[in-house]
Structure formats: structure tokens, C-alpha cells
Image (cartoon, helix red, strand yellow):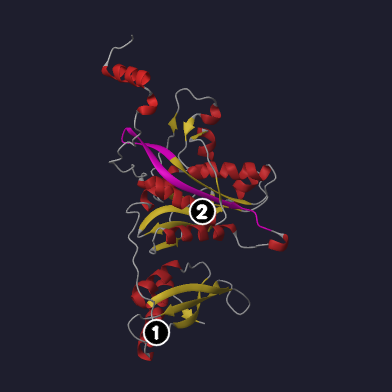
Amino acid sequence: FDMEQEMDIVEEYARLNGYEKIQETLPIFDRTPTHHDAFYTLKNKISAVMQASGFSQAFNYAFTSQTNEQKFMQSAKAIQTYGFKVDDDSVTIRNPLSEEWNAMRRLTSFSIWKNTTENFHMGNERGQLFEIGSAFSKADGTYIESNRLAISSWGNEFGLYSNSTPNVYKVRASIERLFAMLGMTSYTFKELDVKVPFLHYGQSASIVVEGQAVGFIGTVHPQLIQQEKVRVDVAIAELNLDIICQGQPRPMRFKSVSNFQAVERDFSFVVDANKSMGEFMTDVKKSLGGVCKDIRIFDIYQGDKLDSKQKSVSVRVTMQSGDAELTETQITENVTKIMASAEKIIGAKLR
């Protein structure tokens, strides 16, 4: 016999006496399965939102060409301004497979840009991509891995389903849907403080959430478009998920729908042609408080009736109270606050 331990005796008994005589019992499950990592679950939700917005998910290696990435990025200091830890030098690989894979990427937007150009050159003249991945940098003698979301949209539909909406607005809309899913309402798209070399300066912005820069968005610079022989406009964005996902998931709060009538007021302001309205709209929300349910731009006019250095911006403000009907006095006070904010922030006058 090959009996060396107690279990061998049990096995021999079962074999000689008959396995069919052993009563079957299920094992005792006295522990709950391990929950998924919170960030893993959150990444799946982000992926679902982006796919629902019409974007396809890309998967790229974290390796890249140090030379090509540097040509694309140009300035690490500019990228640092928008919530990213990016070093001047890449994290290089000691034994790279080739020069195309000799460093760890510092920007996921560079990978999504390469996906875009390759798709276009393969005949896909329009499309939308996103990637949730890691970027790497060096700081204080150690290596840092950060989680990023990169987004790209290029070309436009034509024919029966033609759509002339600029790609940068499509990308922005997807980001706004993402913030809505995450329960974030205090965010804005601000004019760039420092130029991002690979973005069109007049069509780009920084993304600020709750007072903190978390990324950038914009149309790719025409020179870069021309160099890569891409014949359509391309918009890209990159967000720092490590910052955005702090405190997630946020508790969901419910409140009853107001039974009182909402009041809308339209304003047409004459401002300098190069003025941005973002700061003004944020200030209006602060000054009106919870009464301000929505503020949005619905028309921009530049033409013969105005000076060439001016533009007319029409804004609609929706006001509503959850406690009582707004009186004419309250509405007038709020309108006065809006006018004061317009004059203080953007130097605007009513048209």
C-alpha cells in the first residue's frame, strides 16, 4: 500500500467500501466574495458612459517612442499647468524592443493621437475614440504611475446623417456627461493660461473641477494636422482620473421637484470679440445661488451692425425657487445682479 498519511487511509476505505456510499454535502460558505476594487468598478462606469456617447475604446501599450512623444508634447511645463505630473525626461527602458518602444509614455493623448492618424490613413475619415490607461513620470527620485482618460474625435458625418458640429464640442459634451455620472456640477472650461503646443490656441481650454485643473481639451494644431497629412479637424482631450475619482462614488442626494414656475430671462451683451464668457457664467451662478437653475449661451453674433472688434452674446438664465413663487421684486434683484456681474467680469453692455 502507498499509505503515508491519514488521507490515504480515507481514500482506501472509500475505494474498498464504495464511493457511492459516501453522503454528498456542500462545503460551508461562511465568507462573502471579495468586492471589486473601487477604481476598477469606476473605470467600467466611465467606459460605459463614453461608449454611450458614441466613442469606441482603444487599448494601447504604455511603451512609446521617446523622440516622437517629445516632438508631439514639446513642453512638459505647459502640460504640468493642467493637473499632470510630467517630467522633462521620459522614463526610459533599459532593453527596448526597438526605438519605437524605448520609453514609458507621459501622455495618453499622444497614444490616442497616433490611433487617430493611423485610422485616418487606413480610410476611416471620421471616428471617435477614448482610452483609459496609465502614464508614467519621474519625481523626487521615484517613479509615478497615474491614471488618465484620453479622448479623440475627428471628421464629420455626411449625407443623410450629416453633422457639422465641431469635434471639440463633441468631446466636451462627452466630458460633461461623464461629470454628470460622477455627480460633479462645479466645473468649467477656462481659457488656457499657458499654451499647449499641439493644440489650436483659439480652440482649446483647460478643464477645472471644483477649483482644481484636471486636464485640457482642444482642436489639434493645424501645423500638426498638416505634418501628419490628416485632412480633417481633430479634437483631443486628456483628464487626470486620479484627481477626478477622489471621493468617488459620491453619495446621491434627492430633492423634490419644485412646484413653482421657472422664470427665464434673456440678455444680449456686447463685448470685446476676444472675451470669454465662462468666468461670467460662473460668477452669475455664485451670485444667484440655488435660484439659478441654468445659464447658457444660445446665440453669438458678429456682423455689420457691430464694430469689427465686438461681438453680441445672447445668454438665457433660468431662475426657480423650491420654496415659493419668485416675485417681481426678487426677479428684478437677480437681473440687477446679472447686469452687475456682466459689467464687472467682462465689461459688457446690453445690446
**Neighbours of disc 2 within 10 Å: few (<14), some (14-19), many (20+):** many
| Dominant secondary structure of the residues highlighted in magenta in the image | strand
Q: Tag on residue 260? A: 1
What is the x, y in percent for residue 18? Answer: 38, 23
Residue 74 in sight in this render: no
Which one is in front, 309 or 128?
128
Magenta stretch: give its range: 135-157
Q: Which residue is mark 2?
A: 50
Q: Is residue 143 magenta?
A: yes
Is there a contact, CB below 8 Å, between mark 2 and mark 1? no
Left or right: residue 340 compared with residue 129: left
Amino acid at the residue labelled 2: Met
Which comes sooner in the sequence, label 2 or label 1? 2
Residue shown at 53%/39% (left/top)?
Answer: 71
Q: Could you say which quadrant of the image residue 324 lies in?
A: bottom left
Amino acid at the residue labelled 1: Phe
Which one is in front, 143 or 326?
326
What is the x, y in percent for residue 211? Answer: 35, 59
**Helix, strand or loop under label 1:** loop
**5 lies above or below 160:** above
What is the x, y in percent for residue 288? Answer: 35, 77
Residue 291 in sight in this render: yes
Residue shown at 47%/80% (left/top)?
Answer: 349
